[in-house]
Image (cartoon, coloured by chain):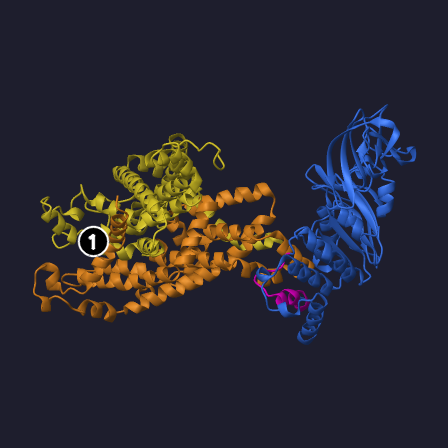
Chain colours: A yellow, B orange, C blue
Amino acid sequence: MIVLLLLPALLLLLVVFVVPLFRYAWLSFHADSVITGLIAIPNGGANWLRLFQDQRYWQDLGQTLRFAGVSVGLELILALCIALLLDQRWRGRDVVRTLALIPWALPTTVMALGWRWIFNTPYGPVDHFTKIAGIGSLNILGDPNFAWIATVWADVWKTTPFAALILLAGLQTIPADLYEALLLEGGNALICLRRITLPLLRPYILLALLFRIAQSFGVFDLIQVLTGGGPASTTESIALYAYWNALRFLDFGYSSTIIMASFVLISLICVIAWIVLQVLIPSHPKSRGVI
Amino acid sequence: MNRRFLIGLLLVWSLGPLLWQVYTSFCSDQALIQPFVSHDQRWTLIHYQNVLNANPPFWRYLVNSLIVGVSSTFLCLLLALPAAYALNRIPRQLSTLSRLALVGAALFPYVLLFLALLELARALNLGNQLLALSLPYAALSQPLAILLLNNAFNDLPPELEDAAKLEGLSLFQRFRWILIPLISPATASTAILVFLFSWNEYPIALTWISDSSKLTLPVAMARIAGSSIYSVPYGAYAAATVLGSIPLVLLVLIFQKPIVSGLTSGAVKG
Amino acid sequence: MTLQIQNLGRHVGQQWIVRHLNLHVDNGECVALVGPSGCGKSSTLRLIAGLDQASEGEIILNRKNVSHVSAAQRAVGMVFQSYALLPHLSVFANLELGLRVRGVRASDRQQRIQAMLELVQLQDRANVLPAKLSGGQRQRVALARALLRDPDVYLLDEPMSNLDAQLREELRPELRRLVLDRQKPVIHVTHDQHEAMAIADRIAVLHSGRIQQVASPTELYHHPETLFIAKFIGRPQINCLRPKDGVVTAVRPESLFFAKEGLPCKIMSREWLGSSQLLYLDSPEGSLRLSCSTSVDIPELLIVSWHRSDEHYFDAESGRRL
């Protein structure tokens, strides 16, 4: 009886999450493209070999890693600041919190279009700003050195509210008397942060971190609409590359290989991030209540 | 640091880009190119007219997204509610493992699944059908939904169900009269989060639907971005952005409580 | 319509929660199930109700073996310690739900619920939500719900423990009257032995998942089968002298009196209880409690004694009566 309740959900989950991974793994060892008439023919590790030698893939991987690293790093710091700000009680706080959520709620592609305009040279506001500031016209979206910064900025803008909310939830579980006790002993805000806030927030930071790292590896919407992967594929992400291989070059075998490799990588990075965070932030000694 | 200043900064940062789009959408093409053009040549409604009168009309996309959003939410809840309930009634190790797996699935970047899902769509002939999108959407939001609803079920005192059993209520009756009414806040939160996800989803909608009259909002926006039939497209782009954003802004403002409580409770117990 | 439990037992994993439970409750009889926290009282109740599945044994209700019948079908009325009222429904709706689900017609439902509300004196509270009721009122609603069920057995799981002492005393006779009026077997679980002694026809003492003795209150008081029961039943607690040759001798505080020959004692403290007083004494045999009326004079030289016939003997190891 209980099984019946679980079954539909379970089936759907298996079909959508588990089956694809097996399918990708299988496909990655086959050639399946226009050349093979869209029929899968086993080709051993040929796809994988090609992947290891694919310059564009490694470039994309590097770009994606850079994107993910910078984006997530910035996000978490900003999110912490925002969460700290929202944790206190002041008039209109709830309204501000809601308004700050709007970036997160907007579809990425909708706002990406907006960002294209904002970063547009020579007519966009950023360009005006840099001209006024004396930096001159930067042609952000057209410059291979700067385009990725625009993508990071747009991504941080959209996803920070979510991370902030998670951290805020964590902050609200910290009892106020812990801070009071430390302040009485002569601590200041910085020490409070280091000794109380960060350790107790660790599980939330971890959650936000893992979530964001995993998600940013899949960055697709933003890149496709904001830069199209350019200029000269300098902002292209591995998800976008996989997409093009599948839908533009119709090479499903290779696309599967890219996806499979990404999956392995994401899992690895998440594990590493988890370990690193355990080391970086010590866990709080069990102190329920003040002495 | 002055708190007011920080709050102002936060608001400017959060809303600035969107407000800039609003501003842009009312600027004539000329004003966009030459920022210091005279006042009466500055403001115009032409961009909105263009967008709304395009073929297919803009509101069509909103309707499509609405259809997909509602059906996905409905399907998701239909499957997740029983599953969330049942999760507590299986042996402990199995349920802990399942919960872990669900968290993993919730974190997973679903974009990577686009290829397999596309193959699925082709195999089952699900392409270009709005309602068919509710299947992958419901599936992708299951992990989060099940976890949130499961937490809500866990918070109910177990005696309530015991008493109901003794009153003679069957499982279905318990669901109907007791369990579901009592977790309605969590259900509301889950529903709105799933709806938002479905509305904003891009890669799967992109690959499953190509018929221009059936596009959902995000895909339509991307298409608009890809085309440049306007001389200076950014006015039209901005109008489209604003129109595309209004429903979401409204949703957030109206449903802010369930949204926030859903996200925070997910974080706290996740 | 009686309740019979035969060799009932339940284990979770390797541990037996309750075992070898044998009990028989007649119509109109109230058996109190007492014991310390965690001894298995609530578990027993849940087994009888069908909320948990027994690992062994049989439950025979109304001459039918219901051991494998689901809780919904078992015709059991239970009042929970927390009352378990549905918070989102009014008093009336709470009472109505069960009737509705069992197919009673709307007009009949109205009638029966009205009658019940009058019986428990909550007529003017019909449309109130449980959160707005006092503890005592909630208890009455929970009771009304069980009565409406008209079950074959009533199970009361510490129905009074969330109420303050005064309310408990007031509601006790009313509870007894309402439930026993139905002439069905009643099991009343409580950790308060005083309450058990007051309301029950018989008391079953539970310890570590086993029933140690089932008897009337007086029987339990005067002839406890085990040392545990001797110490559990009766306030102030019975005096246990130091074990000699593997035998523990126990004497009730009210059996002690001042005499010219006996144990020399010193007063450690004294509790004045209104009509009686309780003295905590220190003697060569250990600490003793003496209970007597306040009109008794306490002599200068404290020598305490008791009649041989008031002694109870227990085996030092097993606790069994000798």
Question: Relative to residue C133, is residue A236 drawn left or right?
Answer: left
User: Which residue has dot 1 on it?
Assistant: A116
Of A243 and C24, nearer the camera is C24
Q: Is residue C182 left or right of residue B262?
A: right
Instruction: State whether residue C313 is above or below residue B106.
Output: above
Magenta stretch, residue numbers:
C84-100
Residue at the spot 25% in from the left edge and 52% down from the top edge: B8
For this orientation, the residue located farthest to the right is C309
Identify the subunit bearing mark 1. Answer: A
The N terminus of chain A: image quadrant:
bottom right
| Residue C94 lies in the magenta stretch | yes
Amino acid type, label 1: Arg
Give the number of marks.
1
Q: Is residue A34 visible?
A: no
Residue A55 lies in quadrant: top left
Give residue C6's position: percent from left, percent from top: 82, 47
What residue do we see at 80% from left, 24% from top?
Answer: C284
Using the rendered image of the protein, determine whether residue A265 is visible from the camera's viewpoint: yes
| Residue that appears at 38% across and 46% down | A168
Question: How far across and how far down the image is residue A210, in percent?
Answer: 39, 41
Which residue appears farthest toward the bottom when viewing the image?
Answer: C107
Left/right placement of residue B112 relative to residue C284 reads left
